[in-house]
Each structure stands twice: as C-alpha cells, then as structure tokens.
Image: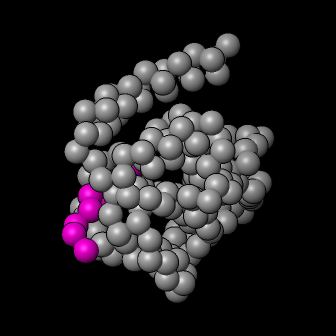
Amino acid sequence: MSSDRDTKANRRRFLPYLAYAAAELPRYHGLEAEVTIDGQRLDTGVVGILAANTRSYGGLLEVTREARADDGLLDVCIYRGTGRVQLLSALAMTVLGRHVGADSVVYRRARAIAVQTHSPWPVQADGEDVGQTPLTIVCVPRSVTVIVPAGRRSPLWNPGPTLGSIAR
C-alpha cells in the first residue's frame, strides 16, 4: 500500500516539471554538442544528456536504470537529435522503459564526462539550475558515506559493512 501512495506522491511532485516543460516546448531546440566520455569524443546533436549514479529521475523515471550508487561510475544517457519531435520521442521511449538500446540513445558507464556546446546550454543538478556548458562531471568513488538501515537491500548498492564493524 505505501508503495502505491509513494508512487502517487512522486507523480504529483513531477507535475510542476511537466507543466514547465509543456510551456517551454514551443521554444525548445536541441543543439550540437561535443561530449567526451572517459576520453572518447562524440560529436552529435542532443536533446538531452543525463549523468547519474542512481536510477530515478524526479522520483518517477528510471533514465539510468543500470546505475549503482557505489560502483564509482556515472551512468550517462545521451538523447540524440535536434528538435521537439526527437525530444518528445525520447521522453516517450523513457516513460515506456525502451530508451536503452534505441538508435537515438547513447548509454554508457563512465568515470568522467565533459560537455561542450557552441552556445551555452543550461545545466541542472538534482532539478536545480547550477550553471551552463561547458562542464565536466567526475565521479569520485567512495567520497560519500551513506548510512542504510541494517538488512536493507537495494540494486543501487552492494551490501557493505555495518556500523558495528566500522566502529571496531
């Protein structure tokens, strides 16, 4: 029951983002980008790029569905294209869980990603505006300690030491 309640709450929280996206759609266009993933350069048109170490985006969409919080890697999802049609197609594929493996999507795991664009492109971190391109994102393994209730299992992390074993 609580998972149904949580899902509904997540959907309600996502609605303002969806309303904003709908309002911005008529003005939206993708752009050409130079994306470097662990030293490998990709020049392509993009309608969106997401780099994450967890799976959920906005508590609703699993964009980087293979991500693990403790593996020292970012999961990078690049939506290729340059216009509204490609953006809407990418969103639909993602909602349906069919984006990974699609021809228009590049999905990689990496230690670092750099993005350069000819004109500045807004950058968000956890839904907040934090700047614009160019940017570099580097995953620093084991840089954050997370305390999880004993016995809690998740595909996001490997079972680790308990507090008792750390204190000794």
Instruction: Determine if the magenta segment contains residue 73.
Output: no
Q: Residue at x 42, y 45 (%)?
A: 85
Residue 20 in picture, x, y percent from top left: 28, 34
Residue 123 in picture, x, y percent from top left: 31, 58
Q: Is residue 99 above or below residue 141?
A: above
Q: Is residue 36 visible?
A: yes
Q: Residue at x 26, y 58 (%)?
A: 122
Residue 54 in picture, x, y percent from top left: 58, 52
**Quadrant in the picture for the N terminus:** top right
* Residue situated in front as seen by the camera: 10 or 115: 115
Residues rendered magenta in the picture: 118-126
The reply, left or right, for residue 19 in relation to residue 78 is left
Residue 89 in picture, x, y percent from top left: 50, 43
Q: Is residue 145 visible?
A: no
Q: Is residue 59 above or below residue 42?
A: above
Residue 150 placement: quadrant: top right
Q: Residue at x 48, y 60 (%)?
A: 80
Q: Residue furthest bottom?
A: 39
How many circles with numbers are drawn on the protein?
0
* Residue situated in front as seen by the camera: 163 or 130: 130
Instruction: Determine if the magenta segment contains residue 123.
Output: yes
* Residue situated in front as seen by the camera: 25 or 154: 25
The reply, left or right, for residue 119 in relation to residue 115 is left
Q: Is residue 120 above or below residue 40?
A: above
Q: How is the image coloured?
A: one colour
**Quadrant in the picture for the C terminus:** bottom right
Residue 103 placement: quadrant: bottom right
